[in-house]
Amino acid sequence: MDGRRITPYDPIVRAIVLVGGAGTRLRPLTWRTPKQLVPVLNRPLLEHLLLHLRRHNVTQITLAMTERSEDIRTAFGDGAALGIQLSYEYEDTPLGSGGAIASVAQGWDEPFLVCNGDIITDIDLTAMIAFHREHAAELTMHLHEVDDPSGFGVAVTAPDGRITQFIEKPPRETAPSRLINAGNWLFEPSLLNEMNPTTFNRIEDGLFPALCDAERPIYGFSQPGYWKDVGNSQALLTVNLDLVTGLIPGHLSADTQGVLIGSGTNIADADLQAPSVIGPDCQIGQNVTISGSVLWDHVTIESGAIIKDSIIASGVTIGRTAKLDRSVIAHGARIGAGVELTDASVEPDQQIEAGA
Ligand code: GTP
């Protein structure tokens, strides 16, 4: 820093995005595709987050990875295609959020943003940065209000936004508020001394409650708006359907009327009902009905099949007159003619025939 007084208008340009998790809750889809590359509107999930950061001038971004996330580097390279500068740091074994942040940011002397790499939101990061500066916060946490906070970290705030209590995953009946940790945080570099860069540690379990207990300046920033943690297949389906109906402006390049169709896809005389997202290079046969569903690339749906509220991953074939409802079909599986599946989860390359 040059000694000049910091104003709320000073940008924060650096971010760490955490992408080193195993994505277990999104299996079987994540057996072959890392969570950050699962398609949302036919683009990788992470691309939506990176473009959101760019919109708020956060352009120097480090992805905190493990070896199994290498496909992410192949997909995004140096970030130039998205107008950002991307770099990559690897953990030999997962270090958790605290370990990952501390090891990536060692030596940084400016405030920075940290994001969970599986969030889609339209939070105004520019306003959050100004709030952080105005309150001279050491840490500012994006908070989002939900009906059931029991699966999240829950924050209690004072009228000025200061977080006075942070509890990880409290039972619904005893949760002290409905404001949850939304997975975006602004950090002052002074906090780097308080996380161990070499052993597994989670800020949700260590740093956040410790800052509250010590009455340090940790603040919550919340706004009404869109927020989704794409942790499981239901959330992945919901986020695709929300975005294809235009719930967050700027994610669709044209008005799709609620049905997005990828390039190279051939559609016979089929009934495609909004909202739905069809990936590239798919073959959709005669009299097929698709509603409330997401198809990835190279999917074949044979004549007369009915697909409802389902996700179908790359290279799957659905046979004639098969019926799928609320099901997840992983890469390369084959569902035979006439098979009916409800609430099913089908593994990669699995074959299911009628009567089996
Ligand atoms: P589940 O296994 O289904 O819980 O998913 P996950 O592994 O992605 O965990 P979670 O949703 O809690 O992680 C939130 C974000 O942090 C995701 O973007 C993960 O990729 C990332 N993440 C989780 N653990 C680590 C870690 O140890 N190191 C790094 N670098 N990132 C992590």
Image (tube, rainbow, N blue to C red):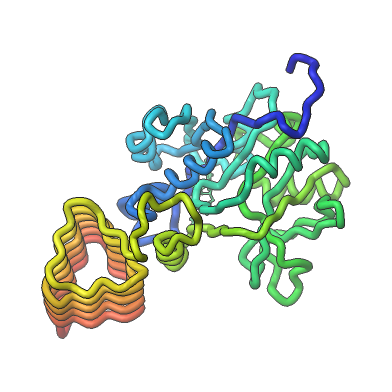
Above or below, 164 relative to 342: above
Residue 55 shown left or right of residue 346 in the figure: right
Q: Is residue 251 visible?
A: yes
Q: In the picture, residue 344 is in which quadrant? A: bottom left
Residue at (87%, 45%) from the top-left corner?
214
List x then y, in percent, for residue 94.
Answer: 51, 42
List x then y, in percent, for residue 139.
Answer: 75, 41
Point out the residue furthest to the bottom here.
355
Q: How many numbered badges does the structure rendering display?
A: 0
List x then y, in percent, for residue 164.
Answer: 84, 54
Residue 238 shown left or right of residue 39 in the figure: right
Above or below, 260 relative to 270: above
Point out the residue furthest to the top here.
2
Residue at (86%, 57%) from the top-left corner?
159
Residue 234 shown left or right of residue 279 in the figure: right
List x then y, in percent, for residue 297.
Answer: 23, 55
Q: Quadrant of the N terminus?
A: top right
Above or below, 166 relative to 51: below
Q: In the picture, residue 216 is in which quadrant? A: top right
Q: Quadrant of the C terminus?
A: bottom left
Q: Is residue 25 visible?
A: no
Q: In the picture, residue 6 is in which quadrant? A: top right
Residue at (70%, 37%) from the top-left corner?
187
Q: Is 105 in front, or is 118? A: 118
Q: Is 69 in front, or is 238? A: 238
Residue at (58%, 38%) from the top-left corner?
56
